[in-house]
Image (spheres, coloured by chain):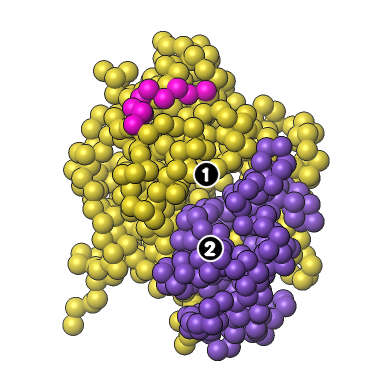
Chain colours: A yellow, B purple
Amino acid sequence: MAAVARTMFEKIWQRHVVVNRDDGNTLLYIDRHMMTDGSAAAFARLRARKAKVRRPDRSFATPDHFVLTNSRLIKDIPDPDHRRLVEQIRSNTAESGVTLFDLGDERQGIVHIVGPEQGITLPGLTLVCGDSHTSTHGALGALAFGIGSSEVTHVMATQSLWQRKPKAMRVSVDGTLAKGITGKDVILAIIAKIGAAGAVGHVIEYAGSAIRGLSIEGRLTVCNMSIEAGGRAGMVAPDDKTIAYVKGRPFAPKEAEWDKAVAFWRTVPSDEGATFDRDVSLNAAEIVPMLTWGTSPEDALPITGRVPSPGAADAAKQDGIKRALEYMDLVPGTPLDQVPVDRVFIGSCTNARIEDLREAAQVAKGRKAVIPAWVVAGSGLVKKQAEAEGLDKIFMAAGFDWREPGCSMCVGMNGDTGLPGQRIASTSNRNFVGRQGRGVRTHLLSPAMAAAAAVTGRFTDVRKLLA
Amino acid sequence: MEPFTKLKAIAVPIDQANVDTDQIIPARYLGKPRPQQVEGFFHDMRLDPNGRPREGVTLNNPGYAGAKIIVGGENFACGSSRENAVTVMVDHGYRAFIAPSFGDIFFGNCFQNGVLPIRLPADRVARIRVILHELPGAEISIDLAAQTVLGPDGKSDRFEVDPFRKDCLLKGVDEVALTMGYEKDIAAFETKQRQEMSWL
């Protein structure tokens, strides 16, 4: 009898079952636990119950949400509550034996940039973090998802989580992406198609020739925003590119263990004929540079489009569109490439890897920013690499601000926020009301599109600048 | 954890779809100690930039004072994993949420805090919200053991809930303690994994 064809998700899930209960719940083993400076409450809960981190060797931490991007010194953090959180990650990891990439260490950075960069994230494993963008790590063929703070304590204490198995969904993007089209445009096009709740209860596998054609960094961007489509996780099958990416990274397996791991990773992709609960497909050739106009990531349109009119939508959606247009201060029918921009943010776990900075620098090179523009590298190592390539000089010559790694203006927890009414072109992942500061209007787009907005002062089809 | 069995309480409607956890508690409150986070509860949705209550916001309507249930729209509490979105609502007295669908992480976080999220069909949830708008202060009764929601119109709906989560809520089970009871299984898994996936 032939074995049943299984999806990649199914294979990884089955490999990590500790206990299956009759009521449909599984105690799932967690191979890697990433922590941020948001972990203090979880450590306090662990201490209150006199428990210990069960597997400090499987746990890694770095401060990112509350760190400053203009100083590496904890004492410079003006808010005493924030300062304490960044101090506590140091004391908590020291006490528990968890590996820390601390402020001042070049390996520090945004947790979802650090994991893949250090080889902590590997194909076929399970990884969690108390942050919704943990879906990023799935780009290497891992099952990775965000959890709440109580679950963080649970993983600390037991290295496992109670889960009901999500459904499997495949999003196929086939064909060839046009020049200037990036992973960010692909994921915004996907979310626009399936909606912000389109993948609730599902793990997404991104497949198809256009996804295979993306670099690992492009795949990380795509998987990062799975949560913005409601997905529990996002993943891409590991292939030669994945294995080449992982090889030689500090926490990746070495020598004989490497060969064993690679042999296993080759078995991780979905079997031919595996069935998914849902299948969605997109034509890569139709994807053009995208940006969001509203207050949900599903409000994404091609740069060639116009601000939508509530009247054109079905009745149930009209109120939401009206509300979004009012908050965003946009007039229906306005061509998107005529909307002026006040400020630019290039950074975040979505788009602060080296390729992102290269794409933005290519547009900035020899031009001048006409509005304030920030570049916040995703990690100290990304920053160092960019400086070795001279990207920092290109950005600074173009009038961009070159800053220290952290989550920064994606979420503004560290105080990096816009002013009320400002319109920001941002490479981050959420355009929610107030996300980048009270009253701030966020438009999501790719690093190249963000740089194009910086040098023109309005949303601009980057293909015109790349010609 | 405090058990959840039955709840009869005023319910407040929030009509918008995709209400994200950044709306429930803006990021600027997350670095503060929990008692100070209370102020962040739907702060920017409730208050204008001058701190005055916005008109037409149900959460500002005194008719819903004392509500313990929120009846929301599609994809309620999507976005960020911040568990503070649950705890800030708990600290304002809320114990149950009814919506057609929820953000997955929020849904899981509810059970960790003794709070019940209930999925009902979209048309039924919309109908309940209409009634609640018409009759501020109307009550909803929830019986977790029987898995029923008695609406303000006297109509009863059955809801689905995971049996494990239900049991934990009814008994107020401490999940970490429960899982520690599986220590032998976890240790056995680790021994097997060391052999099969020695590179980890």
The residue located at (36%, 28%) in the rendering is A334
Q: What subunit carries mark 1?
A: A
User: Can residue A275 be seen at all in this image of the molecule?
Assistant: yes
- The quarter of the picture where the N terminus of chain A appears is bottom left
Percent position of residue A304, x then y? 29, 30
Disc nearest the viewer among 2 and 1: 2
Q: Amino acid at mark 2?
A: Gly
Q: Quadrant of residue A335?
A: top left
B116 inside magenta stretch: no
Q: Which residue is mark 1?
A: A432
- The quarter of the picture where the C terminus of chain A appears is top left
Question: Are labels 2 and 1 on one chain?
Answer: no
The residue located at (72%, 41%) in the rendering is B51
- Residue at the extreme front: B134
Q: Is residue A256 left or right of residue B183?
A: left
Percent position of residue B163, x then y? 52, 84
Kindly check if marks 2 and 1 are in contact, taking CB atoms under 8 A apart as contact.
no
The residue located at (59%, 40%) in the rendering is A434
Q: Amino acid at mark 1?
A: Phe
Q: What is the distance, in whole Å, between disc 2 and disc 1 at their CAs?
A: 17 Å
Image height check: is A295 above or below A384? below
Image height check: is A347 above or below A29? above
Q: Which residue is mark 2?
A: B72
Q: Is residue B45 left or right of residue A139?
A: right
> In the image shown, does B92 or A370 lie closer to the viewer?
B92
Circle 1 SS class? loop
Tell me the tag on residue B65. Answer: none
Main SS, magenta residues: loop
Q: Which residues are magenta?
A: A333-342
